[in-house]
Amino acid sequence: MFADSGGRITRFSSTPDDIAKAQRLQGRAILPGLVNGHSHAFQRVLRGRTEHRTASDRDSFWTWRERMYHAANRLSPQELYHASRMAFLEMLLAGITTVGEFHYLHHAPDGTPYADRNELAWQVLRAAGDTGLRIALLRTAYARSGWSKPAEPGQARFVTPKVEDFIADTEALRAAAGNSDMAWVGVAPHSLRAVPLDYVREVVAYARAQQMPIHMHVSEQPADVDACVAEYKQRPVELLEANGLLDSRFTAVHSIHVTAEEVSALARSGATVCACPTTERNLGDGTLPADRYLSAGVPISLGSDSNVQINMLEDARELEYHLRLLKLERAILTAKQLFSCATEAGAASVGLPAGSLQPGRPADFFTVALDDPSLAGASASAKMESLLSHIVFSAERTAVRDVVVGGNFVIRDGSHGRADDIIRDFVQVQKKLWNLP
């Protein structure tokens, strides 16, 4: 494989001259870089901090959310940078080359805008640049706590009450970030619970005019559906379709609690669904009807969401394993389908022409060591279906050895050049945040 100075694949060649110039990766399989379609990088600080029962009669997503607010409101801009770097380092070590960062920390903890209203977005973008990860910064709109409910104190950092301010801030970030295939901007109305319908319409109209990706949390919890029906007399996907808000640039994140007609509506629009199985099982959200979506022609991308675990291959296999548990069957989805969710569907969702290794596309790939214990017995000379099944269903993160983004090695032999500093700085953030010795 050869790439040009812009980091795009120019050709594949086996001529003697080209072989002499190439770097050989002996005993390794090369695969397209994985795409993480949905992340909240700052939530990396929560890992392991919410795995206990509270005083609540029933712990759920909603009790977890209160703990998340506690963490979100104690991070300084520099601490957000360190937390994001830690999450992005882990992504690279897992073979992820691109992330869609659903970014909703905008202001100081009391809701006061920073002098640069995009200060926190810049910290996240800096973290991605310093680790070598591509990023779609999905700037998130948040306006209220729920129907007829003002924002709660814990949400003050998230809220931009006026849609014109949200659009102006997003446009300022987009203009300053420039036209780079390493970092670009999309929009993300948080949810129909957190953003009124008229606000959503204006954000979507702005994004469409600029040809930006649009992401939104949809039907993650039954309570999201109930709240939407109470306010609008329609279920979330029904409402989005009725208002012309679904199209091929729209990604419905989670979209777990849906009817057959809502699946059909997403299929008609060309929208993508982003599943986050490791987070969805951690939060007790429910399981995605992945077989129904794929049968209807709805692409499924994958995300690490809360970053309780960062492993796109684990997310891919969980799509299948959840179905096996529900249906009491095996082999419902193939390794090829699942790997496409982790690559091509994710790339399309965040607006990147990537996800496969072919001329003209970014030279983004990762390698797995075929002598890793988790892959022992697999062979690069085996049928592609067999090798891919080994990787999708059995590979551990220890098997990932090299990661290349835009033709540049960012992980070499399982190591990142700045890992020691990144981990040290993150540990200090955790000590301060959780009052550790």
Image (cartoon, rainbow, N blue to C red):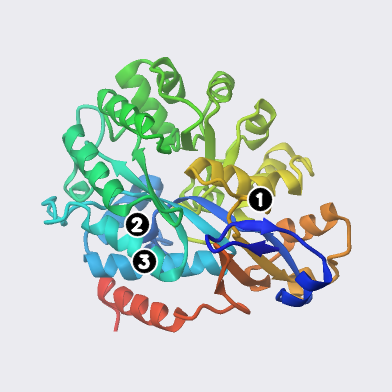
Q: Secondary structure at mark 1?
A: loop
Disc on the earlier residue, 2 or 3: 2
Side of 377 where 84 appears, left or right? left
Kindly identify which residue carries mark 3: 127
Give the quadrant of the C terminus: bottom left
Q: Residue visible at 58% across and 24% down?
A: 267
Which numbered disc, 2 or 3, marks the residue closer to the eye?
A: 3
State whether residue 102 is above or below residue 203: below
Work out whether residue 370 can be spotted.
no
Which label number is shown at residue 356? 1
Q: Closest to the observer: 337 or 207?
A: 207
Amino acid at pointer 3: Ala
Amino acid at pointer 2: Thr
State whether residue 33 is above or below residue 402: above
Tell me where residue 396 appears, x and y as whole percent: 67, 67
Q: How many marks?
A: 3
Amino acid at pointer 1: Ser
Kindly identify which residue carries mark 2: 54
Q: Closest to the observer: 326 or 246?
A: 246
Quadrant of residue 386 in the image?
bottom right
CA gap, disc 2 to disc 1? 45 Å
